Structures are given as structure tokens and as C-alpha cells.
Image (cartoon, rainbow, N blue to C red):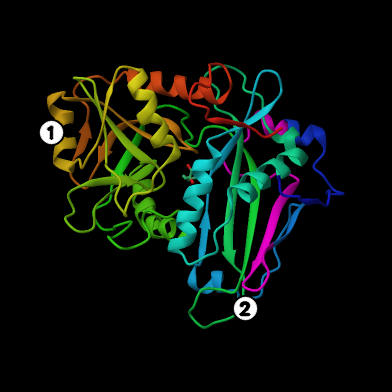
Amino acid sequence: MPTNFEILPSNQPIADEIRDNILKNPGFGKHFTDHMAHVRWTVDADWHGHQVRPYGPLTLDPAASVLHYGQEIFEGIKAYRHADGSIWTFRPEKNAERFRRSARRLALPELSDEDFIGSLKALLAQDQAWVPTPASASDECSLYLRPFMIASEAFLGVRPAHEVDYYVIASPAAAYFKGGIAPVSIWLSSNYKRAAPGGTGFAKCGGNYAASLAAQKEAEAHQCGQVAFLDAAENKWVEELGGMNLFFVFKDGRLVTPRLTDTILEGVTRNSVLTLAKDEGLTPEERAISIDEWREGAASGEITEVFACGTAAVITPVGELVTENERIKLAAGGNNEIAMRIRTKLLDLQYGRSEDKYGWLTQLV
Ligand code: COI
């Protein structure tokens, strides 16, 4: 039974020609559609008040606990336009499940699959004109959907809030990195850690991203697009980037990614790459990989490619790892052939150009 969302249409939607211009060159996360979905939760009434209403500022009490204690979680998922005009999303049950995992860690209420996927469908029914049409098979334009949940109760005591709001906003998106799919330089953070055992690293909460920003600033000062974090306990094991997972291609066909721990966010793209890699004849391995193995494998030619992946970044090759005193480049490879092959496979699937043999697509409109 789909959840019923009350529809309150905007009486000031963005004009068609302005929207069409935005869709030609949307960038990432800069423009927003005409509506947003909203569901409210209170300790007494559970989830209620399902609405799609005009996009606009939220009214929050200055004492709302999200503003003080950061009780917040979010998701990232995309809507893709297929050649016949229909609109689809990719593995939304995985995002819904992760959203519940994040909610449990942040002591927020859990949202059902029905409400999570229902909110995406209800929003897209209103804002479908905002989903860009890809210009070619390598074009990764989409409508990026950002579900999020905040503690909105006005209360300064430190305890889980009794009032919570869930929203979905949507933003037309092109490539996440300015250079598109050009290899990105990564800064290795030596001063900062993103997550520690027992902490919130596996949850998609704002605090993890806030904790990555000082390191991201260092990355930018060194002309790097992202920052890589090592584990907090031993300062030795590669974990993830500020907002993406990492993969290493070995010359013998192994595809290695750090195994999941409570300090690593399980990416839906990461999980999908592990499956698609097998179809490509690669041997996926989820295991700990040290910074020394990265350095030595890059130098010896054992590692032929490194790439980052995520919903926003799709698959982006990593050109080099930069530290205070070295630049770790790949002695071999450099054509990123495997990364590009997996990227094409993933995009073909998401845009309906290949058979959905794993049943990963859900139609939104
Ligand atoms: C995503 O890939 O959806 C994220 O949330 C990461 C962020 C870099 C936008």
C-alpha cells in the first residue's frame, strides 16, 4: 500500500526556460526543484503528516536540538531519465536500509521502506521536469535526491529528541568533481581522523562530514579534490575518502576495497561495483589495505588503478595521492581502463541501456 502524500503545489514554480537553462549545466548541489517532501514524527503520534509542499526555508525553533547536538542523518540517491522519458532510481531499498541503520546509531526514529521510497515517488511526481536528459552514454546527469532527518524538538537537555522531521529535497546534478571524470588528486590526511571504532563512521550523519572539513580544507590548499582518511587506531589502514569509497585494481585482476568496519560507510555504489566486477572477470576482495601497500603497489606496478566511488561521484579515477612529503603516483596503468569499464556498465544499467539483471531499478515516474 503506497503511503498517501498530500500535495500542496507551489504557486511560484521556476519558469520553464530558467529550469531548462539550469538543466543544461547544473553543476552539483547548487539548484533545487520546486517542491520538497516532508513527514513528521513525534514520540506520541509516530510518523504522520505526509506532504509534498513548495521548496523553501524551514521554520525551526532556535532551540531545535539538531542545531545544538547535531542529531541528523541523510542519504544520497539519484533519479535517472531513460530514453523513453520514464524516471527510475537505483537500489532505493539499500538506501532505506542504511537510513534506518544511521537512524539507530543517532537515536532517531526509523523510517519504513514504504515511506522512504514513497517520498521519492511523491516528490518526483511533482518535479519530474527537473530530471535532466543525458546528452550521451557517458553523460552522468541526473536529479540528485537528498533525504534527511533532523531532531526538531526545542529542548536543550541532551537526550534523543521527541520531535523529528524527515524531508527530501532534489537538485539537478552533473559530475560531482569540477574536472568531470578526469583523475582526481587525493590528499592524505595526517592531522585528522574521520571516524573511530564505536563512533558514527558507518552512519551517514552530518557530523562525519563536519569532521572531515578541516582535512578537506587542507586538501584544497594542496590542489586536491578529496581527502583520504586512515584508521584512528593504528594510523595505517586506508578507510575511505571524505564522502566516497575507494577501490584498488591489481595487475592480476584482483579488485580490492577496504572491508567494512564500523568506521566505514557502506556505499551503495561500492556494493554494486563488487557485483559488477565479477561480471567483468575481476576478483573482488574486501580486506584491510594499508597505506604502505598503496605506496609500494603503486611504485612496483602491482596496483594499476585506483578509483573512488559514490552516488555523487559515480566512479572517478584517482590520479595521485598527495602527502606532506610525497606524491604517490601509479607507475603502471594510468589509462583507468577497468574504472571506465565498470563506470560504463553502471551507467548503462542506471539509464536503462542494458538489462537490469539484478533487479536494481525502481520506477519513480
Ligand atoms: C553521495 O555520494 O551521495 C554523498 O552523500 C557524498 C557527498 C560527497 C555528496
In the picture, the quarter occupied by the N terminus is: top right
In the picture, the quarter occupied by the C terminus is: top right
Residue 2 makes an appearance in the image: yes
Circle 2: element type: loop
Mark 2 crowdedness (10 Å alpha carbons): few <14, some 14-19, many ≥20: some
Apparent side of residue 128 relative to residue 73 in the rendered image (left or right): right
Amino acid at pointer 2:
Ala
Circle 1: element type: helix
Amino acid at pointer 1:
Glu
Is 79 situated above or below 331? below
Mark 1 crowdedness (10 Å alpha carbons): few <14, some 14-19, many ≥20: some
Residues at circles 1 and 2 in contact by the CB criterion of under 8 Å: no
Q: Earlier in the sequence, mark 1 or mark 2?
A: 2
The residue sitting at 71% across, 35% down in the picture is 130
Is 24 situated above or below 235? above
The residue sitting at 71% across, 45% down in the picture is 2
For residue 296, the mark is: 1
For residue 269, the mark is: none
**Given the current orientation, which residue lies at the most extreme right position?**
11
Q: Position of residue 342 (x, y in %)?
A: 40, 22
- Looking at the rendering, the stretch of residues picked out in magenta corresponds to 21-47
Q: Position of residue 247 (x, y in %)?
A: 30, 33
Measure the alpha-carbon separation of dots 1 and 2.
53 Å
For residue 154, the mark is: 2
